[in-house]
Amino acid sequence: MLRKISASILNTPLHIGRGWGWVFSLLLLLQSCRHDIIVWPSEEEEVGATRQDSILGFYLLNEGNMGSNKCTMDFYDYATGTYTRNVYGNANPSAVKELGDVGNDLRIYGSRMWAVINCSNKIEVMEARTARRVGQVNLANCRYIAFHEGYAYVSSYAGPVQINPDYEQKGIVVKIDTATLEKVDTCIVGFQPDRLDITGGKIYVANSGGYMFPNYENTVSVIDLATFCEEKRIPVAVNLHHLIADARGQVWVSSRGDYYGNASALYCITDPAGEAHVRRIATPDGTDLVVENMTLCGDSLYLIGKEFSFSEMRDVENYAIVDTRTHGVLTTSFITDGTEASIQEPYGIAVHPHTREILIGDARSHVNPGTLFCFSPDGLLLWKVRTGDIPAHFAFLR
């Protein structure tokens, strides 16, 4: 009953051909396995861009809009040039409701893959090579995950989904043993903590206060790995979101702003474990960078973003690259062939660590299938393909 992700990845002889006949047959089969719960079969599409590399392919976690229970996972195989939609459902035909409600992060650590499913209050743990389910860690309102020396560290809002300027429940970071999947420790941080990263023996956590409009949080929590206690908080800007530590120990963090007077922006914290100098990163003319998502490849920080500017009364967007050595903005438009005009809502981003091909997930309407765009390092469109709803989080398989 398990369907291949692709012929070059899974060692199973089962292969289901294309055509409507197998679709209906598989639906009937899966219905009987799931006690009348219908599971959509995976779909393959030939993209054609093949490559032999130590990077075998990548997974893409599609968030699905909140309350829809439509989180799905796709896989692209570099050896065959095949893009397969909904690999989790067919690798795990007995998993009720499949992945669940709102996929918020996806990471591979060792031989396992971890998917943080926010509103389903769980972390799904799978075999990285097959996407077969290994186990589950239950964690309320979980958000992002990072790994260090055999442990997973997960940020959690720890309370219900609720917009309340007087929200009382502070967020937490939970330490999980990656071998046993047991939660072993908890550290209290700021309100509604989001993305986190680890460098220099410290965990850095972006506190958003996102439920507390207009009383947003504005700090990065610093947790000592050895004691697993919060040492301090670094004031940065309101409604923090993404956070990445680079090879020099600098911490890059984005602010969503307040969606009105304070725009989205990017900040760099140098000497974060010491005096913590905070610098706002802007273009030479002082324009802030709009950051919906960001990823680091070598010394280059890639940013995508689009938001409505109340001062200019129009949408402002950028596809930027920042040099982490100099803090300079190299470009605000790394797409060079005009394809950005067809991207409706830039949402997810990843960069191939060897070829530097750029992957951008377009959420489009947020309620219908999105589109994945692949660009050359020079910003030329190589291919695009339909995804699940809200393509957001990538994990490269080695």
Image (cartoon, rainbow, N blue to C red):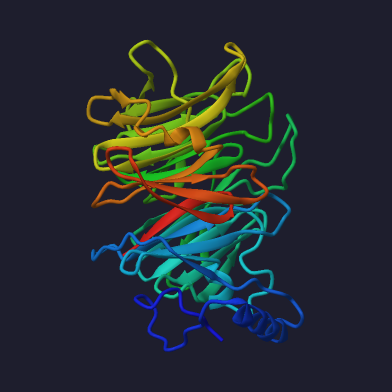
In the displayed structure, 385 sits above or below 247; it is below
Residue at x 55% of width, y 57% of height: 116
Residue at x 32% of width, y 44% of height: 199
> Where on the picture, by quarter, is residue 222?
top left
Query: What is the tally of numbered marks visible in this picture?
Result: 0
Q: Which residue is nearer to you in this view: 280 or 356?
A: 356
In the displayed structure, 359 sits above or below 332; it is below
**Can residue 177 be seen?**
no
In screen coordinates, is 49 left or right of 387?
Answer: left
Q: Position of residue 368 (x, y in %)?
A: 65, 50
In the displayed structure, 57 sits above or below 374; it is below
> Where on the picture, by quarter, is residue 137?
bottom right
**Can residue 315 be seen?**
yes
Q: Position of residue 383 (x, y in %)?
A: 39, 51
Residue at x 67% of width, y 80% of height: 24
Q: Position of residue 240 (x, y in %)?
A: 52, 32
Q: Position of residue 296 (x, y in %)?
A: 33, 42
Q: Quadrant of the C terminus?
A: bottom left
In screen coordinates, is 178 left or right of 366?
Answer: left
Q: Which residue is nearer to you in this view: 97 or 151?
A: 97
> Where on the picture, by quarter, is residue 315?
top right
Q: Quadrant of the N terminus?
A: bottom right
In the displayed structure, 6 sits above or below 116; it is below
Residue at x 50% of width, y 76% of height: 132
**View extreme (bottom): residue:** 13
